[in-house]
Image (cartoon, rainbow, N blue to C red):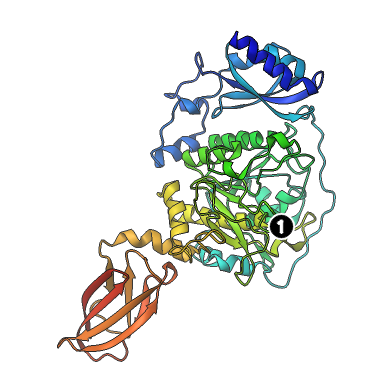
Amino acid sequence: MERYRAILFLLFAFSSATAQVNRYFVYFKDKQGTPYSVSEPSQFLSERSIARRQNQVISITEEDLPVNPAYVAQVKATGANTFFTSRWWNGVLIETDASNIANIQSLPIVKSISYVAPGKKLSSGRQSSIKQKKNTEASQPVNMVQLQQIGLDVMHDSGYRGEGVLIAIFDSGFQGVNVTAPFAALFTDGRIKQTFNFVNNTSGVYQNDDHGTEVFSVMAAYTEGSYTGGVHKADYCLYLTEDVSSEYRIEEFNWTFAAERADSAGVDVINSSLGYYDFDDASMNYEKSQLDGMTAIVTRAARKAFEKGIVVVCSAGNEGGNSWKTVTPPADADAVFGVGSITSSEALSSFSSQGPTADARIKPDVVAMGSATSVVKINGSLGTASGTSLASPLIASLAAGVRQAFPDLNVAQIYESIIRSADQASKPDNLKGYGLPHFTAAKNYIERTQTEEKVSLYPNPVSGNSLYIKLKSVEATSLQIRIYDSQGKRVEEINYPISWMNNPFEYDISKLYVGLYFMQVQMGELISTIKFVRL
């Protein structure tokens, strides 16, 4: 009786689309009888993916097993066209006539079916590409401000430009990337490792739209003396997941398919300058109360990717100036970088989405320059664009650089090092989150574990005029420093601003005579006294 009622309900739900081919996601009840095994992960995960899990002590579980192909075959036998499967959601995307849904639901292997988009789309193999080809050079790098704000210039000078890091970009199309000069090195070096178009079911991604081109350029484009991408030496996977012609839940599933493919490929970082809450079918819309990090399909997928050891970076959304105002999924996911936007003067961009989440977590997580960000346009020329979409790849570049510089860190440690060292970490808010991060600050935060002392001084004894003070933890915005001579007389006292950017910091002792001294450092409730000798 219950199965009969379920079938009647589905017939009613899809009656308006009867005799029309639509797209649906079919969820299976289990993975019983699967030919795959967690003991043989090389059947479904790359060597690089397995190594990423091993390095971060992440177990391979049944969730990682591919969908049982026999189950997919049973769905296909009903007359449905089957396409992408999802290991994490244990199901398959299909195109079929609405009248066939009851037949599929009646299969004993099927748990449920979700309507995700109207019409037939996945059979299309048409491709188009940009025919313009132009290279415009500037007299000097035009994107230096956006790099300097978060220390990507320092990162480059330290030798970290993304070498050996694999990054996946999810977007709406990458027109011009394959034919314009600023991206040429990616192809000559063989650093485009994988491409796929989940909207049209083809390998062609250099089509449909140029939003991804501009986003990608912030990370990967390079023209000597004119433009330097944040991690222009990294390897990349380009996935087209966003359908610019419409807005339906299908795109959240495309995002999931891409994330699973990125996981299998061994990707280290995902950048997604996409967000979802308002759809062409209002019944699919999300409410603000659902921004809890556990509800939206794309949010859950982003969190899954994080759990598999991938750093996930996404745009916070451009809703700050409208009634929605809040961040958009997947930016509400916990431990996923939801990136807000600032201007070149570090003011909050008016359009940048705000927090908190429905469960009162701080969002966005961090900010970067998303107003008048320098980008490479579709024809290879230089220009600007605005939106949190352009701030996100800057933070993804930073995360990739941290991954390269500290390959032994796990994904949670990378996330923590960036947010906890940002300039608002001591007082985060729901406009800029933890604030503006910086490579130097993150590096200092990570390296704090090299000493067990809460405060250390070096060199000690000191023969020059500079004494360096290093804190194991920065828990306030200023220090009170008092210096006493060997007789206990206070000879100096100052308040010194402190952050992860200047930790360790240089203290000038040129006014001190040769002798024994005691330095008392006070930061909040921490008080530490250390002896040092001036030679």
Above/below status of 356 relative to 61: below
Does dot 1 land on a helix, a strand or a loop?
Answer: helix
Q: Amino acid at mark 1?
A: Pro
Determine if residue 508 is in view: no
Residue 132 percent across, percent down from the top left: 84, 53
- Residue depicted at x 58% and y 51%: 234
**Quadrant of the snapshot with the C terminus:** bottom left
Judged from this view, the residue extending furthest toward the left is: 487
Give the quarter of the image for residue 289.
top right
Residue 217 percent across, percent down from the top left: 68, 55
Residue 23 percent across, percent down from the top left: 73, 26
- Residue depicted at x 48% and y 48%: 335
- Residue depicted at x 56% and y 37%: 295
Judge from the rendering whether residue 101 lies leftward or rightward of residue 475; answer left or right: right
Judge from the rendering whether residue 172 lies leftward or rightward of residue 414; answer left or right: right
- Circle 1 residue: 182
Depth check, front residue: 236 or 71: 71
